[in-house]
Amino acid sequence: MDVIVSRSGGLAGTRLTWEVRVDEQPDPDEWYILIDEIPWGEPPPLPPEPDRFVYRIRCEPHEATLAERQLTGPWRQLVDRVQETTDPERHGRSEPRPPRPAR
Protein backbone atom coordinates (compact mmCIF):
# COMPACT_ATOMS: atom_id res chain seq x y z
CA MET A 1 0.00 0.00 0.00
CA ASP A 2 1.24 3.49 -0.85
CA VAL A 3 0.49 6.69 1.07
CA ILE A 4 0.93 9.84 -1.02
CA VAL A 5 0.77 13.31 0.50
CA SER A 6 0.89 16.38 -1.73
CA ARG A 7 1.13 19.90 -0.33
CA SER A 8 0.34 22.86 -2.54
CA GLY A 9 -0.45 26.52 -2.10
CA GLY A 10 1.21 28.96 0.21
CA LEU A 11 2.78 32.15 -1.03
CA ALA A 12 5.33 30.43 -3.30
CA GLY A 13 2.77 28.04 -4.78
CA THR A 14 5.25 25.16 -4.99
CA ARG A 15 3.83 21.65 -4.75
CA LEU A 16 5.68 19.00 -2.75
CA THR A 17 4.83 15.30 -2.85
CA TRP A 18 5.87 12.61 -0.39
CA GLU A 19 5.27 8.92 -1.12
CA VAL A 20 5.72 6.02 1.28
CA ARG A 21 5.36 2.31 0.55
CA VAL A 22 3.87 1.06 3.80
CA ASP A 23 4.81 -2.58 3.25
CA GLU A 24 8.48 -1.61 2.97
CA GLN A 25 8.53 0.17 6.34
CA PRO A 26 9.96 -1.54 9.45
CA ASP A 27 6.59 -1.13 11.23
CA PRO A 28 3.85 -1.65 8.60
CA ASP A 29 1.29 -2.75 11.22
CA GLU A 30 1.53 0.64 12.95
CA TRP A 31 0.99 2.38 9.61
CA TYR A 32 -2.11 0.28 8.90
CA ILE A 33 -3.54 1.01 12.35
CA LEU A 34 -3.04 4.76 11.83
CA ILE A 35 -4.55 4.65 8.33
CA ASP A 36 -7.59 2.80 9.72
CA GLU A 37 -8.06 5.53 12.37
CA ILE A 38 -8.44 8.23 9.72
CA PRO A 39 -12.07 9.37 9.35
CA TRP A 40 -11.80 9.38 5.54
CA GLY A 41 -15.46 10.23 4.97
CA GLU A 42 -15.49 13.03 7.53
CA PRO A 43 -12.61 15.50 7.24
CA PRO A 44 -12.71 18.24 9.89
CA PRO A 45 -14.94 21.14 8.77
CA LEU A 46 -13.13 24.30 7.72
CA PRO A 47 -13.19 26.17 4.42
CA PRO A 48 -9.86 26.49 2.58
CA GLU A 49 -8.01 29.74 3.22
CA PRO A 50 -6.15 31.83 0.65
CA ASP A 51 -2.33 31.64 0.70
CA ARG A 52 -2.35 28.63 3.04
CA PHE A 53 -1.23 25.11 2.34
CA VAL A 54 -3.67 22.50 1.06
CA TYR A 55 -2.92 18.80 1.54
CA ARG A 56 -4.11 15.99 -0.70
CA ILE A 57 -3.80 12.63 1.01
CA ARG A 58 -4.15 9.46 -1.07
CA CYS A 59 -4.17 5.93 0.21
CA GLU A 60 -6.15 3.65 -2.10
CA PRO A 61 -9.10 3.47 -2.04
CA HIS A 62 -9.18 6.65 0.06
CA GLU A 63 -8.47 10.25 -0.86
CA ALA A 64 -9.03 13.52 0.98
CA THR A 65 -8.12 17.17 0.47
CA LEU A 66 -7.72 19.28 3.59
CA ALA A 67 -6.73 22.83 4.40
CA GLU A 68 -3.68 23.19 6.63
CA ARG A 69 -5.77 23.99 9.72
CA GLN A 70 -7.85 20.83 9.19
CA LEU A 71 -4.83 18.61 9.83
CA THR A 72 -5.62 17.49 13.35
CA GLY A 73 -5.55 14.18 15.21
CA PRO A 74 -4.83 11.15 13.02
CA TRP A 75 -4.74 13.35 9.88
CA ARG A 76 -1.79 15.29 11.34
CA GLN A 77 -0.11 12.11 12.60
CA LEU A 78 -0.25 10.51 9.16
CA VAL A 79 1.04 13.59 7.32
CA ASP A 80 3.86 14.08 9.85
CA ARG A 81 4.84 10.43 9.63
CA VAL A 82 4.94 10.46 5.82
CA GLN A 83 7.01 13.67 5.81
CA GLU A 84 9.46 12.23 8.36
CA THR A 85 9.88 8.98 6.42
CA THR A 86 10.80 10.28 2.97
CA ASP A 87 12.10 13.36 1.19
CA PRO A 88 9.65 15.36 -0.92
CA GLU A 89 9.60 15.58 -4.68
CA ARG A 90 9.35 19.21 -5.80
CA HIS A 91 7.05 20.36 -8.57
CA GLY A 92 6.58 23.80 -10.10
CA ARG A 93 3.93 26.24 -9.04
CA SER A 94 0.56 24.63 -8.49
CA GLU A 95 -1.06 27.36 -10.61
CA PRO A 96 0.54 29.59 -13.21
CA ARG A 97 0.95 33.19 -12.13
CA PRO A 98 -0.84 35.77 -14.25
CA PRO A 99 1.55 37.85 -16.37
CA ARG A 100 2.67 41.15 -14.87
CA PRO A 101 1.43 44.26 -16.65
CA ALA A 102 3.99 46.06 -18.82
CA ARG A 103 5.37 49.29 -17.38
Image (cartoon, grey):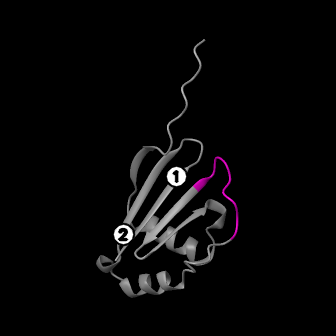
Task: Between residue 74 and residue 44, name the one nearer to us.
Answer: 44
Amino acid type at image mark 1? Ser
Residue beneath the point at 40% across and 75% down: 60
Check the image and report above or below for 48 versus 102. below
Amino acid type at image mark 2? Val
Residue 63 place in picture, x, y as percent:
48, 70
Q: Quadrant of the C terminus?
A: top right
* Residue marked by disc 2: 20
Q: Is residue 95 magenta?
A: no
Q: Quadrant of residue 27?
A: bottom left
Residue 13 place in picture, x, y as percent:
53, 44
* Residue marked by disc 1: 8
Residue 64 place in picture, x, y as percent:
53, 68
Check the image and report above or below for 67 versus 37. above
Q: Which residues are magenta?
A: 45-53
> Circles 2 and 1: CB distance less than 8 Å?
no
